[in-house]
Amino acid sequence: MSIYVDLADHIDEVYGSRMWKHTEDRAFVKLFQALLTEEEALLALHMSESYCTDRELAEITGKTKEEAGELLKSLSVKGIAFVQRINETSVYRLLPYMPGIV
């Protein structure tokens, strides 16, 4: 199993939309393979529907705050994460990924 299959399963579990078992040949997984680096997918696996900061994800993943911040920015540009500014701080959360809609 790949990190991309794990991410597809993780998003389904977070949003309660698990309709089938993901495999390498599913379109959902192939989109992640084309869209994300392994490093981005690994970071996204530590996210949920709850907001978190780059500092919090850095602590969880062992990355620096700057590394986590750059990956989170990339994930938000690619539609995998949502970013919002709260009190001058960027917070991020995992988005439900719907190819063709998001």
Image: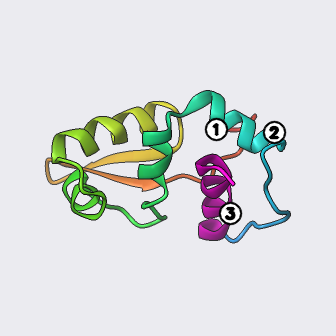
Crowding at dot 2, Cα within 10 Å, few <14 / some 14-19 / many 20+, comes out as few
Label at residue 24: none
In the figure, residue 96 lies in which quadrant? bottom right
Relative image position of residue 32 (x, y in whole percent): 64, 38
Residue receiving disc 2: 27
Q: Which numbered mark, 1 or 3, is in the foreground of this view? A: 1
Q: What element carries label 1?
A: helix
Label at residue 32: 1
For the stretch drawn in magenta, the main secondary structure is: helix
The correct choice, above or below, for 70 with respect to 82 in the image is above
Relative image position of residue 49 (x, y in whole percent): 48, 64
Under mark 1, the amino acid is: Phe
Q: Tags 1 and 2 in contact by the CB under 8 Å rule?
A: no
Instruction: Based on the picture, tell me whether residue 13 belongs to the magenta stretch.
Output: yes
Residue with the most extreme left position? 88
41 sits to left or right of 59? right
The stretch in magenta equals 1-15
Which residue does the image show at 19% across and 55% down from the upper left? 55
Under mark 3, the amino acid is: Asp
Residue at mark 1 to residue at mark 2: CA–CA distance: 9 Å
Sequence-earlier tag: 1 or 2? 2
Residue receiving disc 3: 12
Which residue does the image show at 40% across and 32% down from the upper left? 74
Instruction: Based on the picture, tell me whether residue 19 belongs to the magenta stretch.
Output: no
Relative image position of residue 90 (x, y in whole percent): 24, 47
Crowding at dot 1, Cα within 10 Å, few <14 / some 14-19 / many 20+, comes out as many
Q: Which numbered mark, 2 or 3, is in the foreground of this view? A: 2
Q: What element carries label 3?
A: helix
